[in-house]
Amino acid sequence: MRPRKIPLRKCVACQQMMAKKELIRVVRTPDEAVLIDLTGKKAGRGAYLCGKVACFKLAKKSRALDRALKQTVGSEIYDQLEQDFIAVEDTFNANKDEMDDEDEA
């Protein structure tokens, strides 16, 4: 049997290619809301970021989410996303570790 293909995505801040499961998705929903999507399944235009706060700050500084989501993201939305990003970072890293353990087994 052929090994399963792992979907790759690029971090909009550091431009590094990684497995989709290793990145956090930021989505612009059809009703123009910008939020974090840990499931990776919400409808809308998505952009991917590494699970590091430093990468998020780089994206904020370079306005990378504006380009990736094809919509102007206001500073108050960036501030809210930063708080959400910090809050979900631990959960995301724990889920990523569990996925790695399952892959090894």
Image: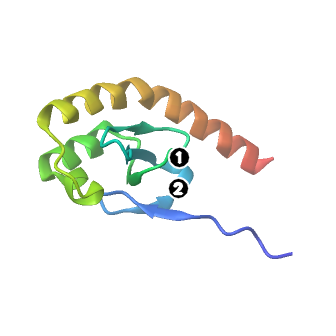
Crowd band around label 1 with a 10 angstrom C-alpha radius: few (<14), some (14–19), many (20+): some
Left or right: where 47 falls relative to 95: left
- The amino acid at mark 2 is Lys
Q: Quadrant of the N terminus?
A: bottom right
Tell which of 61 and 71 is nearer to you. Answer: 71
Residue at left 12%, top 35%? 75
The residue positioned 28% from the left and 58% from the top of the image is 68
Q: Are marks 2 and 1 in contact (CB under 8 Å)?
A: yes
Earlier-in-chain disc, 2 versus 1: 2
- The tag on residue 20 is 2
Left or right of residue 93: residue 68: left
Percent coordinates x, y for residue 101 in the rendering: 71, 41
Image height of 66 relative to 81, above or below: below
Instruction: Say which quarter of the image contains residue 33.
Output: top left
69 or 55: which is nearer to us?
Answer: 69
Compared with 42, 18 (above or below) is below
Q: Position of residue 61 (x, y in %)?
A: 13, 46
- Could you tell me the amino acid type at mark 1? Gly
- Residue at the disc numbered 1: 40
The Cα atoms of the two marked residues, 2 and 1, are separated by 9 Å
Q: Could you tell me which residue is drawn at 38 percent across and 47 percent down?
A: 30
What residue is rendered at 46% in x and 62% in y? Answer: 9
**Furthest residue in direction right, as rendered:** 1
Q: Quadrant of residue 81?
A: top left
Tell me residue 51's x, y (percent).
41, 42
Q: Secondary structure at mark 2?
A: helix
The answer to whether 2 is drawn above or below residue 68 in the figure is below
